[in-house]
Image (spheres, helix red, strand yellow):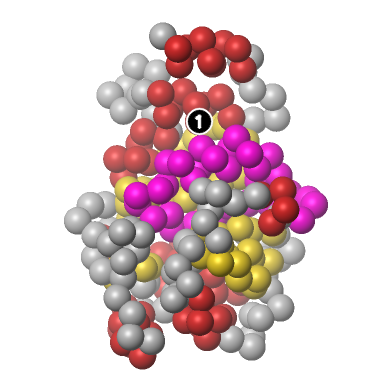
Amino acid sequence: MTLTATQVRELLARYELRPSKALGQHFLADPNTARRIVRLAEVGPGDHVVEVGPGVGSLTVALADAGAHVLAVEIDRHLVPVLRAVVGDRFEHAVEIVQADALEADWAALLAEGRWAMVANLPYNVATPVVIGALERAPMIDRFLVMVQREVGERLAARAGSGAYGAVSVKVAYYAEAKVVGTVSPNVFVPKPKVESALVRLVRRPVPPVSVRDVDELFAL
């Protein structure tokens, strides 16, 4: 069962929690959006998914309900008991919860052998470094479906010559094919952010299109 806005608010009240502005917390609170993300991520039975910033678990449950094995990486220790309660007995064997900072994560140690997908509602304030860090340090993650601030999403997926194109776009393009595959209204979050979100799909390239030296020289300009 994915969570509605009323259920998210009730959970936060029960555990006496308030969303942290410092951690950029905006909890997904719409079952249809959670299922849409799972569908766009093409997650199915037996897939291994790492979710960064699961919050209260609305997307976590949707991923597990689709048959995925989920590693939920949550930095906020206060949210871990809430997440465990939401996952409950039904999905306890499908979901592993780790309290850790994704920006400092040892992905090789956290992720077992095999191929992984990252599917996540990323906190706005760390979305770009989380994606870049995973592209650089987690080759076992070969596809991504991340929800980020719309402006950030457009920058991640920008093509040369577009207004959003910049250093981040170049770095992402070195590792992956990226595309904005949808937008999300602020109304599906608790609390409601002031901006729209974007859903960005990234598929890791088997071989980078240019050498590391070429990229380093470009960033040095």
Residue at x-position 47% and y-position 81%: 82
Local packing at callout 1 (Cα closer than 10 Å; few below 14, some 14-19, many 20+) is: many
> Percent position (x, y) of residue 30?
37, 71
**52 to the left or right of 212:** left
Q: Can you name the residue that lies furthest to the right here?
A: 113
Mark 1, secondary structure of its residue: helix
Residue at the disc numbered 1: 172
Report if residue 1 is visible in the image: no
> How many numbered marks have been drawn onto this rendered protein structure?
1
Residue at x-position 31% and y-position 82%: 9
Task: Give above or below for 24 relative to 142.
Answer: below
Residue at x-position 35% and y-position 36%: 154
| Stretch of the chain drawn in magenta | 112-141
> Percent position (x, y) of residue 112?
76, 56
Task: Give above or below for 55 relative to 145.
Answer: below
Report if residue 79 is visible in the image: yes
> Can you tell which quarter of the image residue 152 is in?
top left
**76 to the left or right of 23:** right
Instruction: Examine the structure image and report whether residue 154 is included in the region drawn in magenta.
Output: no
Q: Nearer the viewer, residue 107 or 186?
A: 107
Q: Nearer the viewer, residue 42 or 159?
A: 159
Q: Which residue type carries mark 1?
A: Val
Residue at x-position 23% and y-position 52%: 195
